[in-house]
Amino acid sequence: MSDHVIVAEEELADGERVVVQIEGREICVFNIDDEFFAYANWCAHQAGPACEGNITGTTTACFDEESLEVELAYEKDDQILNCPWHGWEYDVTTGECLSRQKVQLPQYPVKVEDGNVVVSL
Ligand code: FES
């Protein structure tokens, strides 16, 4: 495993991302609430550029069996990555796909070292 400096920490503000090529792989680094996350820019559905999608929240539904009513809630605002090809949703803080258990974006270790954001591959 080798370390790769991606960007100076101060150049990647909260809510921003950067896509880079490392060792033939396209890697995206996100700053979410001043925490950094690194993923392969690859969607588990049909290999689309998942990391280039919008970041939003998501709507969840809760079904009440007694009243037969469904209650909708908008959650995780600014935390859900939407693949631009067909809309699969991923939690950008974990890489987990919201609609498929055990499916997630390939994730890489990321740290801040000497003021730089560093990813290990
Ligand atoms: S390729 Fe990402 S949702 Fe289809």
Image (cartoon, rainbow, N blue to C red):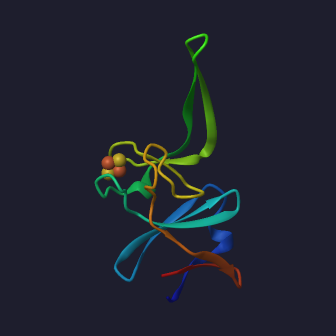
Q: Quadrant of residue 61?
A: top right
Residue drawn at 60 percent across, 75 percent down: 110
Residue drawn at 51 percent across, 54 percent down: 96
Residue that protrudes farthest toward the top in the picture: 67
Q: How many marks?
A: 0
Q: Judge whether 56 appears above or below 113 on screen.
A: above
Q: Judge whether 15 appears above or below 35 on screen.
A: above
Q: Position of residue 19 (x, y in %)?
A: 46, 67
Q: Nearer the viewer, residue 110 or 12?
A: 110
Residue that protrudes farthest toward the front in the picture: 66
Residue drawn at 44 percent across, 70 percent down: 27
Horizontal side of 101 relative to 58 (left or right) equals left
Q: Position of residue 32 (x, y in %)?
A: 64, 57
Q: Nearer the viewer, residue 105 or 24?
A: 105
Q: Position of residue 22 (x, y in %)?
A: 42, 80
Horizontal side of 94 relative to 97 (left or right) equals right
Q: Quadrant of residue 17?
A: bottom right
Horizontal side of 34 relative to 37 (left or right) equals right
Residue drawn at 33 percent across, 43 percent down: 86
Residue that protrudes farthest toward the left in the picture: 46
Q: Nearer the viewer, residue 42 or 96?
A: 96
Q: Judge whether 15 appears above or below 120 on screen.
A: above
Q: Position of residue 111 (x, y in %)?
A: 65, 77
